[in-house]
Image (cartoon, rainbow, N blue to C red):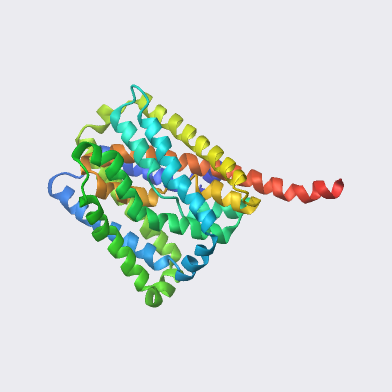
């Protein structure tokens, strides 16, 4: 089954997410069960970021600091150009407000880690730099995303507040830092059990999706979001991904980066993290709003995987064929 899905460039985890959305739509947690699910979800999010902290190597931080120009370029794409595109999308006349908010929140998130590195490696890019860029992006996102969210989304309606930053610090940053400080003692265990911990990561996200969509369904999410709006989310996600990839490619050439580093910009600068975005949304938005906010992120997540999988393989083939062509000439 997994092999069949791989041929179609469909992430099996997406099917699990869709199944979770379906379960939350039919059997949302109510009453005392909603409170229990919320408490378990909060604990799962803290565990998720604790493990992320334990996985991040201090050597990778020091090594990555040397390629500051490359990381600054990726960071500019992730936290400056992406949000500007998101603001442009939200300003589209007639766009449903919750859809516009979801698309904007998507653009404020950090890059992915695993898929950014994997696609860079497949395409023949600078893997070490990709590891550093993706890790730095996720670390920065814990600070930057809440601030940008307060400035562009929640702050517009309620006035700027430090409450989201405090919540992030206690629920996400504190576990992350604790995990990283304990890395000398637990790092080996985490490395040896990567597969099991990967299930923990994904299970945590599924819990957040279930509680978020359950609360949104009880508030009438599926009465508010039409099939036409779902199709519009897919179109906007494709357009957003295409725009950021073109901008990243042009920027890499203008700044004179070599081919291997331009691939880092292409694949790290065009991603948005579902693993970080879903927990952040759960902290930054009221429970009833989270389902609608993360809907565009779920669409964009799968679209970026499908497009980048095809693109990375094509770039790899082109690189493999280049020496043969040069030899023939």
Residue 273 horizontal/vertical position (percent):
41, 49
Residue 265 horizontal/vertical position (percent):
55, 49
Q: Is residue 21 visible?
A: yes
Residue in the picture at 59% in, 55% down: 121
Residue in the picture at 42% in, 66% down: 55
Residue 298 horizontal/vertical position (percent):
39, 41
Left or right: where does residue 260 sit relative to residue 81?
right
Q: Is residue 22 visible?
A: no
Name the one closer to the observer, 273 or 194.
273
Residue reaching furthest to the top: 94
The total number of labels drawn is 0
The quarter of the image holding the C terminus is top right
Left or right: where does residue 309 sit relative to residue 219?
right
Residue in the picture at 25% in, 58% down: 171
Residue 21 horizontal/vertical position (percent):
32, 41
Left or right: where does residue 154 sit relative to residue 30?
right
Left or right: where does residue 26 sit relative to residue 304?
left
Residue reaching furthest to the left: 32
């Amino acid at each position: 089954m997994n092999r069949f899905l791989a041929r179609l460039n469909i992430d099996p985890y997406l099917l699990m997410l869709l199944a979770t959305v379906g379960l939350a739509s039919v059997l949302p947690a109510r009453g005392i069960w909603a409170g229990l699910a919320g408490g378990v979800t909060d604990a799962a999010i803290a565990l998720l970021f604790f493990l992320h902290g334990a996985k991040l190597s201090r050597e990778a931080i020091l090594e990555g600091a040397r390629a500051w120009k490359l990381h600054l370029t990726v960071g500019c794409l992730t936290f400056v150009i992406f949000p500007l595109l998101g603001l442009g999308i939200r300003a589209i006349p007639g766009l449903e407000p919750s859809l516009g908010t979801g698309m904007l929140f998507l653009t404020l998130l950090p890059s992915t880690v695993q898929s950014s590195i994997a696609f860079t490696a497949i395409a023949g890019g600078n893997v070490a730099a990709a590891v550093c860029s993706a890790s730095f992006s996720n670390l920065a996102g814990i600070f930057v995303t809440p601030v940008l969210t307060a400035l562009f989304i929640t702050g517009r309606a309620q006035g700027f507040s430090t409450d989201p930053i405090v919540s992030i610090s206690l629920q996400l940053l504190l576990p992350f830092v604790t995990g990283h400080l304990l890395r000398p003692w637990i790092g080996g265990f985490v490395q040896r059990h990567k597969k099991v911990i990967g299930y923990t990561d994904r299970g945590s996200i599924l819990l957040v999706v279930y509680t978020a969509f359950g609360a949104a369904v009880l508030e009438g999410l599926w009465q508010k979001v039409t099939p036409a709006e779902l199709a519009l989310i897919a179109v906007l996600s494709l357009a957003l991904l295409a725009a950021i990839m073109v901008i990243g490619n042009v920027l890499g050439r203008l700044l004179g980066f070599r081919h291997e580093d331009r691939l880092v910009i292409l694949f790290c600068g065009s991603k948005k993290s579902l693993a970080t975005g879903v927990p952040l949304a759960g902290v930054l938005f009221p429970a009833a709003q989270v389902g609608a906010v993360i809907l565009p992120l779920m669409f964009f997540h799968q679209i970026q995987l499908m497009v980048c999988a095809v693109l990375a393989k094509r770039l790899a083939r082109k690189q493999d064929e280049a020496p043969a062509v040069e030899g023939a000439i």
